[in-house]
Image (cartoon, rainbow, N blue to C red):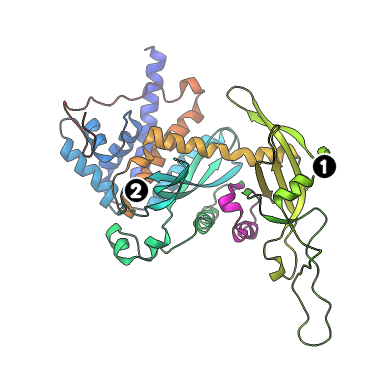
Amino acid sequence: MTQTSVDLDRAAERRLEEYLEAITAVLGHASRTAPARAYCTGLLLPGERKSVEPMAARLAPARVQAAHQSLHHVVAKADWSDDAVLDVVRAHVLPAIERHGLVRSWIIDDTGLPKKGRHSVGVTRQYCGQVGKQENCQVAVTLSLANQHASLPIAYQLYLPETWANDPERRSRAGVPDDVVFQTKPAIALDQIRRALANGVPTGIVLADAAYGVDTEFRASLTALSLVYVVGIQSSTSLWPPGTGPLPPRRWSGRGRPPSRMRRDPEHQPVSAKDLAQRLTADAWQTVTWREGTKAPLASRFAAVRVRPAHRDTDRAEPWPEEWLLVEWPEGEDEPTKYFLSSLPADIAITDLVAAAKGRWRIERDYQELKQEIGLGHYEGRGWRGFHHHASLAIAAYGFLVAERSLFPPEQCFPGRRQAPKLPAGFRPRGAAPA
């Protein structure tokens, strides 16, 4: 190791110490400082499992039981604010990210964490993106900030299914707070967005997949908050083609209250996004490249047209505003593969519209690293508090890595990765399979 690399390693160690000092300063009690610092360090160290017991063994091989108790208490029992920790992470990491450009996107998504049994908070059989099918899992909704260089989760909340939210006994056993009620994922996301706005977080284009984009109230709420968006929708979403819309209210007969609602008739109906896309002429489609991939530039065929959403517009006094319908139809495919609605300005270039829509790829990288490198899904406790405390400290650990990468070229990021002490001879975490 050269003197330069030693100096860089020491500088990184100093930055980590200062960062953890800021994190632990908001935990509310001095006794939580050392175990929280150790917990974050354990998440950053190499190791297949980042649950409490294996981390205790790596951090303190000579006193595993005492270290286990200390780590378990700070993450599962101690009463500190997850929001406060994530605010500190954002305050320290965002300036490093913005060295490479302003925030461009607010990415809404959710991530599934496979889980055995039925007693861990929020576990039920539901779609789990990690395994690509219905599975027993927990699902958390997240809000991330992103620019072209990096991204960072700034909010993380468990989605509590109705079967859990309406079961007092299960809520009590898992320590679900009394003020937590059932919310849809889009409703949770909107709460996260409102809090970010209240905290003065730099805004960006809101990006979300079709699970959020098909929710008309979600899109309307973003517009009411003066936020623009590019969100996925389903092929079956009903739309008014370019230049059309619902019929105006019926003419008043002079009796009763004047009609005020938009209307349709048998000959005047909206169409599905898929039907509209397939009716477009050949010259509506063009090949757009949106970024460099690992092997070649990423490109596909797109069309963009101005449409009006049609969902429940007959309950309204005026039609929904015009938006962009962006459709992707790759060469060789029998039909379009992706559909988006966007409230970006009418004069935006299609290349910029596509680039914005494709910005969600960064959240997949975040989840991959949080799960594989940091151990986001390794927590083995069952309670609400531990679930969120572990995630907050995992995001804090990940945030440090993001900040380091923002300071140096890729080959110099986090030099001299810290090595964990060897595990005690014969150590095997509880629940592990026999050798």
Residue 349 x/y as whole percent: 76, 40
Which residue is at 67% across, 62% downward? 311
Q: Is residue 152 magenta?
A: no
The residue carrying mark 2 is 389
Which residue is at 40% across, 37% downward? 371
Disc nearer the start of the sequence (2/1) = 1
- Amino acid under disc 2: His
Locate residue 403 relative to residue 434 in the image: left or right: right
Residue 211 x/y as whole percent: 56, 51
Locate residue 63 relative to residue 215 in the image: left or right: left
For disc 1, the neighbor class at 10 Å (few under 14, some 14 to 19, many from 20) is few
Q: Secondary structure at mark 1?
A: loop
Q: CA distance from mark 2 to mark 1?
A: 53 Å
Q: Quadrant of residue 222?
A: bottom right
Q: Quadrant of residue 427?
A: top left
Q: Quadrant of residue 147?
A: top right
- Reply above or below: 31 against 421: below
Q: Label 1 near label 2: C-beta < 8 Å? A: no
Q: Is residue 156 visible?
A: no
- Amino acid under disc 1: Thr
Region in magenta: 206-231
The image's mark for residue 281 is 1
Residue 408 x/y as whole percent: 50, 25
Residue 413 x/y as whole percent: 45, 24
Which residue is at 39% across, 27% downward? 12
Which residue is at 76% across, 53% downward? 307
Q: Is residue 266 visible?
A: yes
Q: Quadrant of the N terminus?
A: top left
Q: Is residue 210 magenta?
A: yes
